[in-house]
Amino acid sequence: MRMKNPVKRLLATLTQGVYVVGVGQGGLRDAFTASAVMQVSIRPPMLALAVNPANASFPLLVESGVFAVTALRHDQCAIADFFGTHSARDENKLAAVPWHAAPSGAPVLDEGVSFFDCRVVAQHPAGDHVVFLAEMTGGDFLQGHARPLRYDEVGNMDGSDELLPWHLGGQGDGSEEGR
Ligand SMILES: Cc1cc2nc3c(=O)[nH]c(=O)nc-3n(C[C@H](O)[C@H](O)[C@H](O)COP(=O)(O)O)c2cc1C
């Protein structure tokens, strides 16, 4: 998928994966696509996750204090699109795919490369998102041999091409990369 915005192309050189983040609280469950996931500590293993407070999943995450990250396979673009462009406000996304509960109770997709079960230990506002810092409490491989999907491979699926500024002072726009 082509990215027109030069700042979007620049940010795409920060290698990120594509994940489905599952949350659950009081019998309600939801899952959404996220690229803003990274490891931030070794001992203990900790992840950071940035979440848009407008997501239907946001209050479930805040109230439960847990989430599960499923790392998507390179061929699961359609899953990324589905969980990233539909909201639990309109439909039960988890009814469309096989999933199971992680030990925390948060939903994990049956299909993917791996999953991480996480417990939130801190949160901090970050622009239009909130960053959650979480300890990894468990996890395992699903199809561990498979190559994970990269964020730059899904192009403008999240619509950020139109939202990011188009100029931040640099000269190049990465267009020679032909994306
Ligand atoms: C490729 C991709 C990456 C995304 N990354 C994030 C992210 O890191 N954080 C976030 O809050 N939303 C992200 N989104 C947007 C949410 O997945 C989207 O708003 C979703 O519809 C929210 O679902 P919900 O309302 O059921 O919570 C991403 C979407 C796509 C397609």
Image (tube, rainbow, N blue to C red):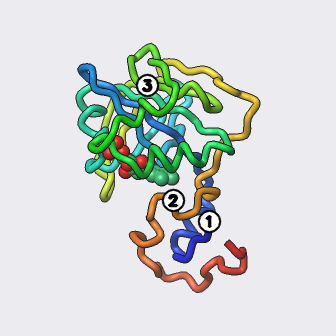
Whether residue 65 can be seen here: no
Most extreme residue toward the bottom, as rendered?
171
Q: Earlier in the sequence, mark 3 or mark 2?
A: 3
- Amino acid at circle 2: Met
Label 1: element kind:
loop
According to the image, label 2 marks what residue? 157
Residue at the spot x=55%, y=76% of the render?
Answer: 4
Residue 45 in percent (x, y) is at 52, 27
Tags 3 and 2 touching, CB below 8 Å: no
- Which of the numbered marks, if any, corresponds to residue 99? none
Residue 128 in percent (x, y) is at 30, 57
147 or 135, which is in the foreground? 147
According to the image, label 1 marks what residue? 1
Label 3: element kind:
strand
Tags 1 and 2 touching, CB below 8 Å: yes
Kindly indicate the quadrant of the structure image that contains residue 31: top left
Residue at the spot x=53%, y=41% of the render?
Answer: 19
CA gap, disc 3 to disc 1?
29 Å
Quarter holding the C terminus is: bottom right
Residue 160 in percent (x, y) is at 44, 65
According to the image, label 3 marks what residue? 107
Label 2: element kind:
loop
Q: Residues within 10 Å of mark 2 (few under 14, many from 20)?
A: some
Would the CB of label 2 be found within 8 Å of ligand 1? yes
Kindly indicate the quadrant of the structure image that contains residue 135: top left
- Amino acid at circle 1: Met
